[in-house]
Image (tube, coloured by chain):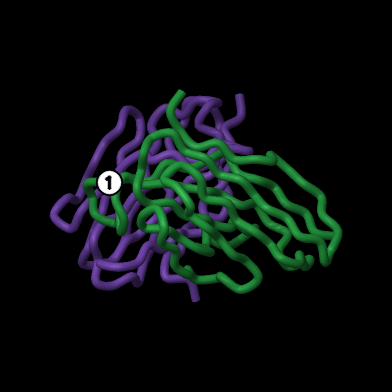
Chain colours: A green, B purple
Amino acid sequence: IAGITQAPTSQILAAGRRMTLRCTQDMRHNAMYWYRQDLGLGLRLIHYSNTAGTTGKGEVPDGYSVSRANTDDFPLTLASAVPSQTSVYFCASSEVAGAISANYGYTFGSGTRLTVV
Amino acid sequence: KNQVEQSPQSLIILEGKNCTLQCNYTVSPFSNLRWYKQDTGRGPVSLTIMTFSENTKSNGRYTATLDADTKQSSLHITASQLSDSASYICVVSSSNDMRFGAGTRLTVKP
């Protein structure tokens, strides 16, 4: 089934540890995104990639890094996790970059629930 | 202050009843507005999308309206079903940005 796969589904992580959240899509979408979802807040963009080989910072990039070595994979790394990074993380993709026009939509993964203790 | 405000935060209705969810936004300039449904433990899935020139869009029992002058949108759910229990998220796009509302949590009870 075409879509986005995120792993792990959930994780409890000790503060100070390094963690990589994985995201893979099989739709050959050019653009990919990482969001975090916190209670009472809308999804906030962490980092994005308009095409393989390029990345950019979103609204809340501090403490996170990404890479886009190929079209399909877009991992998110927390170099040294802190409790404020406890959240649900969603990876998304869109056929073209800047898919804010009415012609293109986002496909979301099922999320990774991360708890930093 | 969030540029996309949704109300109510949560809502409980009985199966078969109708309900309306609200979205007010300040995002400018406006490009389009989407409503997403997010089931528990899942990612958001698009329900409808409307541009400036559209003031109503239906998808089965879901009908979205848009008033670009007052910057308000609503999502009306008709004859609710238990499977409608989910969070409903309003997303407003400008020319170079996309803002998510915090969502309305709907619970449909038998």
The answer to whether residue A73 of the structure is visible from this angle is yes
Residue identified by numbered label 1: A104
B34 lies left or right of A1 = left
Q: Chain of mark 1?
A: A
Which residue appears at 13% of the width and 55% of the height?
B53
Of B48 and B7, which appears nearest the observer?
B48
* Kind of residue at badge 1: Tyr
Q: Is residue B60 above or below residue B11?
A: above
Of A39 and A112, which appears nearest the observer?
A112
A44 lies left or right of A51 = right
Look at the image and tell me in which quarter the C terminus of chain A lies: bottom right
Q: Position of residue B42 (x, y in %)?
A: 57, 38
Farthest bottom residue in view: B1
Q: Position of residue A3 (x, y in %)?
A: 45, 33
SS class, disc 1: loop
- Which of the 4 image quarters holds residue B66? bottom left
Q: Position of residue A43 (x, y in %)?
A: 52, 58
Q: Is residue A98 above or below residue B107?
A: below
Which residue appears at 31% of the width and 55% of the height?
A97
Which residue appears at 33% of the width and 70% of the height?
B27
Q: Position of residue A23 (x, y in %)?
A: 56, 44
